[in-house]
């Protein structure tokens, strides 16, 4: 006796489960300029590598004789795949069915995504597009069970746990609201498309009904809004750019906290010294310069991948390689508030340090820190609270840390740029102290300046006198830095440091005591 008939039925159901919202639903998705979830998965992953989980998951409709009448596919697709040969879990809502709002079968698969990644210790990539729950079918008087069992593990526990175990990436190429929006920000890296994505707690209809405010989806949560809120890290020009950014981000990280960072071969000479570095910092301490240009001259060529450029823009954060070793890179952009740490910059800094610590990425920190941002807006935004969170994140970091004193280092905010056992290099252009010179003179000599015949001339005289006393040499003489260096030596010195820390990185695996949270 053969089971051929049952096997044919299995194949038929698998086929039906892949039909998504049918030809009409798929056509509508394409008309909006967006790919379907299955097309996204195929475009992101290595060719032919997707291994779907729950191939026949759906909501069936039977007649009285148990014959299958209809078959609504689960509107969440999840499974294993490979990116650059490395296994990942990928999952996402199918917007062609119910606008991505989960049906019963889709909800179970979506909850499984984090479990699958954590169980098999591989990165998780989410493709989010949907509106979360719906009031339709929400009544509890039809004889069935309602809600979760009182003994159930909170649904968000696995979402939080995943962030301490595996790299988590979120993508948005369409409208994302409610629970999917919460899921989107619970990630180490999030990216949205510039023209087709919106991220909202509640959509326009809900906002208008609750608050009487009429806004479009883009006005509520488009890319122009969220590039500056920090809800997403990066903006992609289109879906294919989004996939490229995801692949690049993951290339710097291990598959889980139980592996070390993946060092690769590098064709960039570790002894390379760029002549332009000698003139990169102007002698006038108030003249701005391009810190990103400095970073690109020191890191492996073409390896710097910036994260969150438009959020907390006085703080630069990104990933790069030094002699093939992935590192987290922090630096100050002195062209924005002179590089001062704002509330947003402090939050960006803390999250980035915690992400690097979670996955044991060494950190290289280029310091040009004039202090915490001051003024009424800084006080209203609780700058000191978020700044101290950044300080504490660095103070408790367990990863190897190199600090390059490039320019300024003043006040408590400077403490955020140093970690235990850091390797400290100083450029001859560095200035440091309790306060920036100009502000410090104004505070310490206010009476003398006010009593002078020419207060401005007196202030300039005091500043020039004190600046001449701020020589970088005493730090090196007192062994307050490891080395005072020619700026052109920075790359060779850091590449040697990378070799020194390899045994540490071999041993630095496993969960951290304080993993990254959203």
Image (cartoon, rainbow, N blue to C red):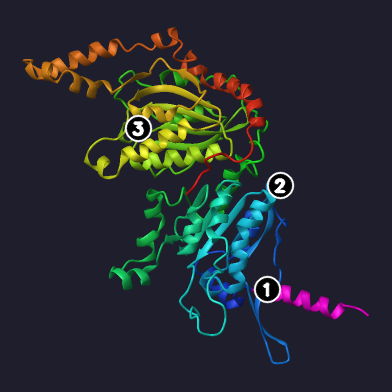
Across and down, in percent, residue 215 comes to 32, 66
At 52% from the left and 48% from the top, the residue drawn is 189
Q: Which element type, helix, strand or loop, lies under badge 1?
A: helix
Choose the circle earlier in sequence order: 2 or 1: 1
At 56% from the left and 54% from the top, the residue drawn is 240
**Count of numbered labels shown in the rendering:** 3
Find out whether residue 2 is within the magenta segment. yes
Kindly identify which residue carries mark 3: 339
Across and down, in percent, residue 305 comes to 52, 39
Kindly identify which residue carries mark 2: 85
Kindly identify which residue carries mark 1: 17
Q: Main secondary structure of the magenta part?
A: helix
Across and down, in percent, residue 46 comes to 69, 52
As drawn, which residue projects farthest toward the top?
477
Find out whether residue 152 is within the magenta segment. no
Drawn side of residue 194 relative to residue 411, left or right: right
Q: Which element type, helix, strand or loop, lies under badge 3?
A: helix
As drawn, which residue projects farthest toward the right?
1
* Quadrant housing residue 250: top right
- For mark 3, does the 10 Å Cα neighbourhood hold few (<14), some (14 to 19), or many (20 or more) residues? many
Across and down, in percent, residue 466 comes to 25, 13
Choose the circle earlier in sequence order: 1 or 3: 1
Can residue 480 be seen here? The reply is yes
Instruction: State whether residue 106 is above or below residue 329.
Output: below
- Magenta highlight range: 1-19
Viewport quadrant of the N terminus: bottom right
In this view, the residue in front, 37 or 297, is: 37
């Amino acid at each position: 006796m053969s089971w051929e008939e049952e096997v044919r039925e299995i194949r038929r159901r698998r086929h039906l489960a892949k039909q998504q919202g049918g030809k009409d639903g798929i056509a509508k998705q394409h008309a909006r300029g967006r790919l379907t979830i299955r097309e996204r998965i195929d475009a992101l992953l290595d060719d032919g590598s997707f291994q779907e989980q729950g191939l026949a998951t759906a909501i069936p409709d039977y007649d009285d004789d148990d014959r299958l009448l209809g078959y609504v596919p689960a509107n969440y697709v999840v499974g294993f795949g490979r990116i650059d040969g490395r296994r990942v879990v990928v999952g996402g809502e199918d917007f062609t069915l119910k606008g991505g709002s989960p049906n019963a079968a889709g909800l179970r698969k979506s909850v499984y995504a984090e479990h699958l990644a954590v169980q098999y210790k591989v990165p998780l990539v989410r493709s989010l597009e949907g509106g979360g729950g719906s009031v339709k079918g929400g009544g509890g008087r039809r004889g069935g069970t309602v809600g979760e069992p009182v003994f159930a593990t909170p649904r968000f526990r696995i979402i939080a746990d995943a962030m301490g175990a595996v790299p988590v990436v979120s993508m948005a190429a369409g409208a994302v609201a409610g629970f999917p929006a919460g899921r989107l920000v619970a990630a180490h890296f999030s990216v949205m498309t510039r023209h087709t994505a919106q991220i909202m707690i509640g959509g326009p209809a809900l906002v208008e009904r609750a608050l009487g405010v009429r806004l479009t989806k883009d006005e509520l949560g488009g890319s122009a809004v969220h590039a500056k809120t920090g809800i997403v890290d990066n903006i992609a020009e289109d879906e294919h750019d989004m996939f490229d950014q995801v692949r690049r981000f993951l290339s710097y990280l291990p598959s889980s906290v139980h592996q070390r960072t993946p060092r690769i071969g590098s064709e960039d000479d570790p002894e390379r010294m760029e002549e332009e570095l000698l003139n990169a910092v102007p002698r006038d301490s108030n003249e701005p310069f391009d810190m990103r240009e400095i970073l690109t001259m020191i890191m492996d060529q073409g390896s710097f991948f910036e994260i969150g450029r438009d959020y907390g823009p006085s703080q630069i954060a990104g990933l790069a390689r030094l002699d093939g070793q992935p590192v987290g890179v922090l630096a100050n952009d002195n062209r924005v508030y002179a590089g001062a740490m704002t509330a947003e910059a402090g939050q960006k800094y803390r999250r980035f340090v915690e992400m690097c610590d979670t996955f044991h990425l060494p950190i290289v920190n280029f310091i040009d820190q004039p202090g915490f941002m001051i003024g009424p807006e800084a006080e209203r935004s609780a700058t000191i609270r978020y700044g101290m969170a950044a300080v504490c994140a660095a103070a408790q970091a367990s990863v190897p840390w190199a600090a390059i004193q490039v320019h300024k280092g003043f006040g408590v905010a400077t403490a955020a740029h140093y970690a235990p056992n850091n390797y400290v290099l100083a450029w001859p252009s560095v200035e440091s102290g309790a306060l920036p010179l100009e502000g410090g003179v104004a505070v310490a000599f206010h009476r003398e300046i006010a009593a002078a015949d020419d207060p401005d001339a007196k202030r300039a005289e005091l500043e020039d006198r004190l600046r001449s006393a701020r020589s970088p040499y005493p730090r090196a003489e007192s062994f307050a830095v490891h080395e005072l260096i020619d700026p052109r030596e920075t790359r060779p010195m850091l590449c040697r440091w990378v070799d020194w820390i390899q045994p540490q990185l071999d041993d630095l695996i496993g969960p951290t005591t304080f993993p990254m949270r959203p």
